[in-house]
Structure formats: C-alpha cells, structure tokens
Amino acid sequence: MNNVGTALYEEMIRTFDMSGASHTKETASLAHLRKEAFRTFKEKGFPTIKDEDWRFTNMAPYLKDAYQLQVPVKVEATALEALLDSTAVEEWDAWKLVLVNGQIDYSLSDLPEAGLLKISSLKEVLGSEEVSKFIGLHQNTDANRLAALNTALFEDGLFIEVAKGQKAEKPLHIVHLYTADVPSFVQPRHLILLGRLSEFTFMESTACVGGEAPVLVNGVLECNLEEGANLTHYVLQRGRRGERMVQHTQVYQARDSRYDNVTISLPETDLIRNQLQVALDGSGSECHLYGLYLPSAGQLIDNHTVVDHLQPHCESNELYKGVLQNSAKAVFNGKIFVRQIAQKTNAFQQNNNLLLGDKALVHSKPQLEIFADDVKCSHGSTIGQFNPESLFYLRARGIGEALAKELLVQAFGADITDRVSSDAVSRHLKKHLLERPVTQLQDVPHIEHI
Amino acid sequence: MLSIKNLHAEVEEKKILKGINLEVKAGEVHAIMGPNGSGKSSLASVLAGRENYQVTEGEVLLYGKDLLDMAPEVRAREGVFLAFQYPVEIPGVSNISFLKTALSEIRAYRGLPPLESREFLKLSKERQALVEFDASLANRSLNEGFSGGEKKRNEIFQLAMLEPKLSILDETDSGLDIDALRIVSAGVNKLRSSDNAFIIITHYQRLLDYIVPDFVHVLYDGRIVRSGTKELALELEEKGYDWLKESLQETSPAQQRVI
Ligand SMILES: Nc1ncnc2c1ncn2[C@@H]1O[C@H](COP(=O)(O)OP(=O)(O)O)[C@@H](O)[C@H]1O
Ligand SMILES: [Mg+2]
C-alpha cells in the first residue's frame, strides 16, 4: 500500500466491506472473484509512478478530490437530450443505447425487440453461471489494479449477447453520458458476448454534461468472441475539464475470429488512460487496432495496449497516431507478446506523433516479447513535425500557414478515420476532428522526448 | 511584370544563384534551359519562396512590389504559380478540396467571396477537360499514388484553376509521354493571354515545339550565360550542353555576365 489517494483508498475499503448486501443475488464464483480482485487492489492501492505501467501517468493529482461513489443522477432530461443530440451520428442507421453514469436509461434509448440480439443491464444477469463465468477472466493482475477495483466494486452496466450465427441487423451506438454536481467516482462494467460465427458492430461515444465537479470514470468492458465471430468497435472519447477516465477494454478471441477497433480521443478531458488488451487465443484469429489521440494543453492521453499471441497463425495490426499541442502530454505503450507455440504470427505495430507545441511531450514505448522463432513482427515509432515540403506545397498554392498546418493535421488523422468502414461514422469522426478546440500552432524550438 | 536584378542565392551556405537578371513582360513566354544542377529549380524555388534558400544579393519585383519580402502564400495570391518539378504526395488531403481551399484563399485576398459549390464544380470540370485530367484523380488524395505523368498533369490542372499571372513550369515535360505533352501544351496555350506570362524551365527543346517561347535563356552555374529567341533552343538541342560548356571556357567571366 502507498499513500496516494489515501482517503479514497479508505473509502474503497469501507465500500467493499458493505457491498455484500447488494450482491446477494450473484453467483458464488463472482463473489469469490470480487474478493480476489479486491485483495489485488487492496495490497498495493492506487497505481503510482513507481509502477512500471504508470511511470509517465501520475494519477495522484486526480485522486485528491472527495469523490462520492453512489451519486444519484440529478440532471434535467432536457440537458441530457441536448448532450445526446451532440453525439448523434448523421445518416447512420443504428440502434441507440444510452447510459447515464453507467446506468442504462431506457427512456433515452432506441433498442431492438428482444430477440437474437440480447441487450440488458448487467445486474440482471449476474445470477447466471453461464454469464458470470466470463467476468474478469483475463485480467486480474497487479498491473491491472484499477480494473480489479472495478471488478470488486462494480454495481451495474451493460450486457449484450449476439446469438450463434447471427449478424445483428443494425449496428449499436452506445452513448455514455456522465454528469456530476459533486465529485463522483463511477465504475461502469460492461460485457459483450459474441456467439460462434456471429457479427456485431458498435460504437461507444462518451460525453460529459452538467456541473463542474470532477468525475473519475474507472470503466471495464469485456468482449468474448467465440469461433469465427466478428466484432467491430469504434470509440469516440470526448469530455470536459475535470473529467478523468480510465478505461480497460479486454478482448478475448477464439479461433478465426476478428476484432477491429478504432479509438479517437479528443481534447479537453484532464486525463484519459486506455488499456486495450487483446488475447488471440485461437489460430487464425486477427485484430486491427487503430487510435488517434489529440491531447491539448495540460492534458494527458495514455494508451496502453497489449496484444497477446497465444496461438499460431494469428495476425495483429496496430497503428496509433497522436497530435500534441501546447503543453499536451501523451503516452503510448504497446506490448506484443508472441508465445512459444504461436508460430507463423504476423504482428505489426506503429506509433507516429506530430508535436506542435514547444512544451508537448510524448513517451512512446513499443515492447515486443517474442518467444516463437517463425514469426513476422515489426514495430516503429516516430516523433516529428510537419513535413516542410508538404507545408511549402500548400502555401505555394495560396493557402495561409495556419490553415495549411490545419490541413496537414487533418490529413495525419485521416489515416485513422479512414479505417472506419462505415462512411457515416467516418464522416462523424472527421467532423469532430474539425471541431476540436482550436489548435494553437506554434513553431517548435526544441523537442523533448524519450 | 517580373523584374529580377542581380539575384544571388545560396542554400546551406552553398552559392547557387550567382547574379541572375531577367525581365518578363505580360504576354511573354520565356524558356529557361540548362544542364542538370545549373540552378533552374533553385531559381523557381527562390521566386516561389522556398524557405531554405537565402537571398544574399539583388532584388525581385512583381508589378513593382518586392516579391522577396512576401510569404509564399502571399506570392501565390499575388499571382505567382510554381508547377513543381517533383510535386509532393500528401495522403489524407483531398485533391479537390485542397484546390477549393486554395482558390478561396486567393479570392479572399482579392476581396472576392468563395465560389459557390456549383460554380466551383463547373469550373473544375471545364479545367479538367482542358488538360484531360482524370476526374477520379481529382477526388483522390493529393498526388498520392499518382504516376509521374499524372502528377505533372495535376500541376497544370491546378494552374488552370488558379489562373495565375506568372506561371513557372519546372520541367513539366519530364515524365510526360508525347501524347500527354501535346495535351498539356495545348492546355497551356489556351491559358496564354496578353496579361499573363510563363517561365518554362526545361531540359529539352521538345516542349518548345508545342509551347513556342518568345525568349530562350541558358542557365549555367547560377548565371544566365546566353539569351536569344527560339532558335537558340534548337541550336542547343543540336549541339548539346557540352558545346555550351566548352564555348564558355573560351569567354571570360566578365563577358558572361553582360548577356
Ligand atoms: N537543399 C539543397 N541543399 C544543398 N544543395 C542543393 C539543395 N538544393 C539544390 N542544391 C544544389 O544546387 C544546385 C542547383 O540545383 P537545381 O536548382 O536543382 O538545378 P537544376 O534544376 O538546374 O537541375 C545543384 O548543385 C544542387 O545540388
Ligand atoms: Mg531542376
């Protein structure tokens, strides 16, 4: 145990000790898991910069607020609806599921009739052995202590199941709204199960409304893909000052399954820490991970990804790009494990950064651990500024310097937004890139990086 | 229109241009020829405002205004256009929306509102036809994956869209086959008028059969060492640049400057 966020730590212990009463309907295995998870958290407490995985991401300043754990939502429906409109994706024919502080709000949602695509609150299914066996399967480690804290304490979230052989008729837009009049600590928990040869596309949008109070979201999403399942997952993270978000996404893939993820993190939130972890545990499975992060002054966006090649003949592709303004900070840490049995692995990883501010800082660290010998792996990391040739070309056509730079930022980002196969979603993401808080472009006299 | 006087420029402390003098009037076409490495592209770069070139001496006036004092985008808005020898590829920037932005910036400088989408589309169709530029290329990322010839055609398509006063074509002919050369030249000839001018940089006489110049200048080692009419180009083609180098060794440096 350390002394980071001590008051909050104490609060967690009190909450856990009292939580038994509200979890009585849950399976014995889940009760056991919660205990184990809490022990993991309790032993070392909140992560500090002494933890290898948190070296450049200091949570301490964000753990000082007097967060409350169970805050009733007190926002007017009209305010929520206005916020909801801002997340709407034009011309995208999709179902809509709205969660407010991690709880489904059916009145704001638009869902299919119960059928082959099953959507419910997670709480409803926690008594089922069939479902709860998928919870917390692959992540109860020391390095994932915040996810473990979520496992120990979560109350509710979302459960989706796509039946075997089914292709969901429409994609699903999941909108996470957060609101806080008092400092709030929210721990949503979601589970998505894809049956054999099923297919599903969903997008998660986050937005924050109401109040100036700090919000700390410690969310966990788990996705389980059975043989031949195909999951497409888009993420658009938006927020406000005072919002801190730690999001753990765990994907487990059986043979011949495919997972596609595109994650865009926009400026304004104080802190975003994404932990995207994919286990390729069946031969012939593949994952494609794309990310674009645009932190602004005083903001930190941290992407920690893990791709674990556990079986032969799997493929992983990863491209993360960052645009850093002013005194923005970013962390990219991409771990790839290729286990001894995982022969014929193809694993690619690339991280490119555009530094636009004189105090901008990026820590980019690829980590490959390869135990098999017949594999193709590559990784690379670049940190640069605008290509002077491109800039000159645009200016030589009459385009002013600031606008030319803006076009180049867009172009840099288009590399990621173009990976989205839905045109409507791709347009939506591009629109948000355009509308992000104005870049203060400056000449960069020197660059610090590690 | 353009007046270059005793222009000296260097790049990375290497002297490249060593006293260029050139007068270009509206309605004229000037060809600049010369062996590789003589400074032709450097001259074009200095005129367009490429930042790694330092002008150490001399002046350049465009309609009496100090061109060297202007940012590259201001030069473009004042009517200077450089068709690049090696156009860059910019993935992610759409060719057509880039052109729309450029045209709007230039029009704004002249106090004009941006073209309506429909007008812009009409203009761009018309100008694409002029240089037979493939419509599918217009909608792609700027020069990305274009062949050498397609890039050059794109330069001339842009020229046709932006209607500059002074166009500098830097080896637009290299990379073009005979048919493409004919098409691009015909396009340029249609754009010629009494109030614009062209500087055509080329290594070969071939292009000048199609775009007939009023004057031909030979650039060698950072200086214009010969000036004449289109016959000079033919002579060069016949005798080659080696003849030029040899004949220059016989003349004194002082004489070279006077041309
Ligand atoms: N960025 C640069 N750095 C150093 N030398 C350069 C640079 N650009 C051009 N040069 C040199 O300037 C000279 C003239 O080049 P250039 O203008 O491209 O000639 P041309 O277009 O006539 O072939 C050459 O010797 C070339 O090597
Ligand atoms: Mg050249």
Image (cartoon, coloured by chain):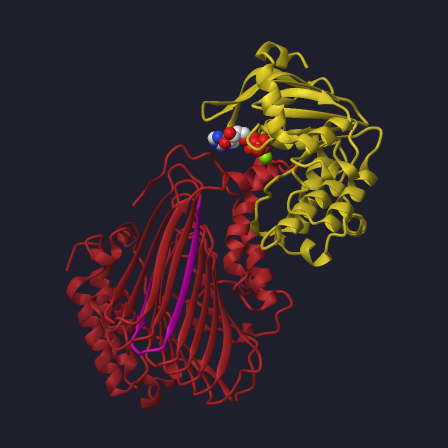
Chain colours: A red, B yellow
> The C terminus of chain B appears in which quarter of the rendering?
top right
Q: Is residue B183 left or right of residue A359?
A: right
Would residue A282 be visible to someone looking at this image? yes
In the rendering, at what x and y percent does residue B30 appear?
74, 28
Frontmost residue, A261 versus A148: A261
Q: Which residues are magenta?
A: A305-324
Compared to residue B132, the image places residue A195 above or below, namely below
In the rendering, at what x and y percent does residue A366 appear?
31, 57
Determine the residue located farthest toward the top in the rendered image: B254
In the rendering, at what x and y percent does residue A159 appear?
42, 80
Is residue A48 within the magenta segment?
A: no
Instruction: Report the residue at 70% width, 49% height from top.
Output: B177
Is residue A323 within the magenta segment?
A: yes
Magenta stretch, main secondary structure, is strand
> The N terminus of chain B appears in which quarter of the rendering?
top right
Q: Quadrant of residue A360?
A: top left
Q: Report ligand 2 position as a quadrant.
A: top right
Compared to residue B103, the image places residue B45 above or below, namely above
Frontmost residue, A332 versus A186: A332
